[in-house]
Image (cartoon, rainbow, N blue to C red):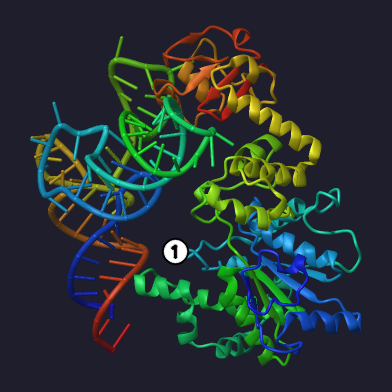
Amino acid sequence: MAKGAGALPGWLERGIADLFPAGEGADPDQQLAARLAEAAQAGRPLRVKLGIDPTGSDIHLGHSILFRKLRAFQDAGHTAVLIIGDFTARIGDPTGKSATRVQLSAAAVEANAETYLLQLGLGQDPARALLDFETPGRLEVRRNSEWLATLDLPQVIELLGISTVGQMLAKEDFSNRYSGGTPISLHEFLYPLLQGYDSVAIEADLELGGTDQKFNVAMGRDLQRHFGQRPQFGLLMPILAGLDGVQKMSKSLGNTVGLSEDPLSMYSKLEKLPDAALPEYLTLLTDLDLATLPENPRERQKALALAITAGRHGEVAALAAQADAATLVAAVPGAAAAADAEVPEASLAAVNFPAKAFYLLSAVGICASSSEARRAIQGGGVRLAGEKLADPNQEFASAAELEGRVLQLGKKTFRRLVLG
RNA sequence: GGGUCGGUGCCCGAGUGGUUAAUGGGGGCGGACUGUAAAUCCGCUGGCUCUGCCUACGUUGGUUCAAAUCCAACCCGGCCCA
């Protein structure tokens, strides 16, 4: 657990990877607990900064741990300042990237920002929303183009003067790339400075981030000091491992659970999470008390999947997903079971009949290509209404004979064929 | 800007004129096993309504019966020098 987290409330301390500074004594500039006490006494909520880079459009569970922590601050009466990095997204955060990021257009960034806010719960039932959009004073949404777009060259040079090449190269990512011979564009050096300047612009008391953000958060402290402000605290959360339990959760690695996924896919992905990742997931993504959970890892997987699914979709939907997942997976060869369960539908409308089996699979979208479908069938991984398909060239004369039947690929992909 | 090395399929990485859709590894998918997992073993892994036809080795041209492999120009990157 983080150093110096002694007198902190449980909601704050849960799951954190790092908190700094964490000095001794009761100095409100060195001890977050003291700062919280000071704020409570003055009746002034802390300003808790979280920056998001609107570069992708789907929020997944990995992102949500920061939002959960931010929400916890909101619920404790503090002000969440959500910064949409619409300006910095156009530079591209080099963090964790082996290569220079593509710069995004302003329009694309804006579109992404909109979908982000919707996924965070803008206009949603506050009970299910990730952030509290409703309570006055609990949320500010800012775009950093507000203050970054108008910086002039002398100001930029001032920012550049605050750090040194040595400091930049000390950042793990930059040093890896530098020593590994991967290009680093000069403008990438600006990113940590601009993110740090965000803290100045909004007068942050604390910045939330993943552990990969330590450098940037620390930079914010330097900049605030330079501009005569009290430096913020840095609160870092672990980077969530993906469903493989090894690599970080990332869309490009295909090991994510999206917040907007349907209950069944969310549940079924989570209930087979590798054992090693369970404690982390339970701590970071649920409020469950680990001490009271059953020891059996299988039971824990279920509890995890149920809790997270219920958080997004409600208890009823989560329980239904659990039941469906059980029927679908348990009864692999049994078609009858799968026939009752909630299964995503696939339309036969785009299929030209007569249709050969491999073509059907691709036309219906269950396989990415017809060649892939052919292989899947030859590999013995495809079932129609429970019957294994043996011949990729098997022909189906009309949609009528397929309607209502369940097409299955592997153990977990099911599609009910419908006419529409 | 000069010198030099290099750009191969999702990724890494072999291949330096001819059964090459292109060795191998990783990843992914499927099968067996299992706790629905992990580990392990096996198979598949460019596209196409596919007994055949397309498109592929940075880009564009060229040499050749034949090129990822040779030549030229260009684009992109590493390193060294400025």
Number of labelled discs?
1
Q: Going 80% across and 39% down the picture, which residue do you hit? A: A315
Secondary structure beneath label 1: loop
- Please state which of residues A260 and A114 is positioned toward the viewer in this rendering: A260
Q: Going 73% across and 45% down the picture, which residue do you hit? A: A307
Left/right placement of residue A71 relative to residue B62 reads right
- Please state which of residues A24 and A127 is positioned toward the viewer in this rendering: A24
Position of residue A134 relative to residue A143, above or below, is above
Q: Quadrant of residue A197?
A: bottom right
**Which residue matches tag 1?**
A99
Position of residue A265 relative to residue A358, above or below, is below
Q: Going 89% across and 69% down the picture, which residue do you hit? A: A137
Instruction: Answer few, some or many: residues within 10 Å of disc 1's Cα (few below 14, many 20 plus, some between 14 and 19).
Output: few
Quarter holding the C terminus of chain A is: top right
Q: Residue A311: where, in percent of width, then height?
A: 76, 47
Q: Residue A165: where, in percent of width, then height?
A: 47, 85
Q: Quadrant of residue A404?
A: top right
Position of residue A207 relative to residue A285, above or below, is below
- Please state which of residues A269 and A366 is positioned toward the viewer in this rendering: A269
Q: Residue A187: where, in percent of width, then height?
A: 51, 75
